[in-house]
Amino acid sequence: MNGYLVFALLAAISVANSALATCPQLDTVEHEGKVYSLARYTSPPYSQKVDDWVNNLPWCSAPGHGRAGYRVEGNQIFLVKFSGCIATLSVSDAFSQLEPKKLATWLNGKLDVALGNCNGGWDPAKEYFIVNQGTLIEFVQATQAK
């Protein structure tokens, strides 16, 4: 087989495999018993322990290790965990604190929910959370969206 045919074969295999690529892990918000994936990553406070944990996770084809997991309690949003492909890291361990959660004061503005799928494209803005310094102002569901 000449070099051109080998290159063409490898290119075809690469294109075929990219269509089946693993979806990235996304930040999540648990609200009223349902977990919503967010269309954009959030920026929780830095923790060297999170970096070390992510670097020691087993290989996984999904990009986005160490994604933030939030939970709404009343009208407040708390960071409660970090997720990797097959593992989670608690907030207590990530920040060396006794409390199992951290008020997400860094969350502000509109947090779009990722609807659809990664291979077909996300369709944000149909469902979203409006947040001010970790306080939930409003949750707009798809049936309410404008």
Image: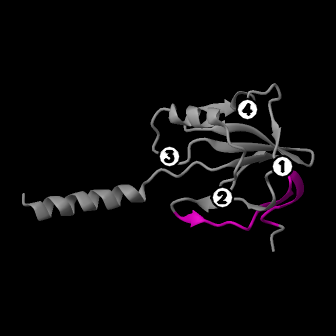
**Any mark on residue 40, and which?**
2
Q: At label 3, which amino acid type do we have?
A: Ala
Q: CA distance from mark 3 to mark 2?
A: 16 Å
N-term-proximal mark, 1 vs 2: 2
| SS class, disc 1 | loop
**Any mark on residue 95, and which?**
4
Residue 91: % across, % down: 74, 33
User: What residue does disc 1 label?
Assistant: 105
Is residue 138 shown in magenta? yes
N-term-proximal mark, 3 vs 1: 3
Q: Is residue 47 above or below residue 62?
A: above
Contact check, label 3 and label 2, Cβ < 8 Å: no
N-term-proximal mark, 3 vs 2: 2
| SS class, disc 3 | loop
- Tag nearer the camera, 1 or 2: 1
> In the figure, residue 136 lies in which quadrant?
bottom right
Return the residue nearer the eye: 40 or 8: 40
User: What residue does disc 3 label?
Assistant: 62
Q: CA distance from mark 1 to mark 4?
A: 15 Å
Q: At label 1, which amino acid type do we have?
A: Thr
- Tag nearer the camera, 2 or 4: 4
N-term-proximal mark, 2 vs 4: 2
N-term-proximal mark, 1 vs 4: 4
User: Around disc 4, counting alpha carbons within 10 Å, would you say few (fewer than 14), some (14 to 19), or many (20 or more)?
Assistant: some
Is residue 14 shown in magenta? no
Q: Magenta residues, as a range?
A: 120-143
| SS class, disc 2 | loop
Residue 103: % across, % down: 84, 42
Return the residue nearer the eye: 45 or 109: 45
Q: Is residue 99 above or below residue 24?
A: above
| SS class, disc 4 | helix
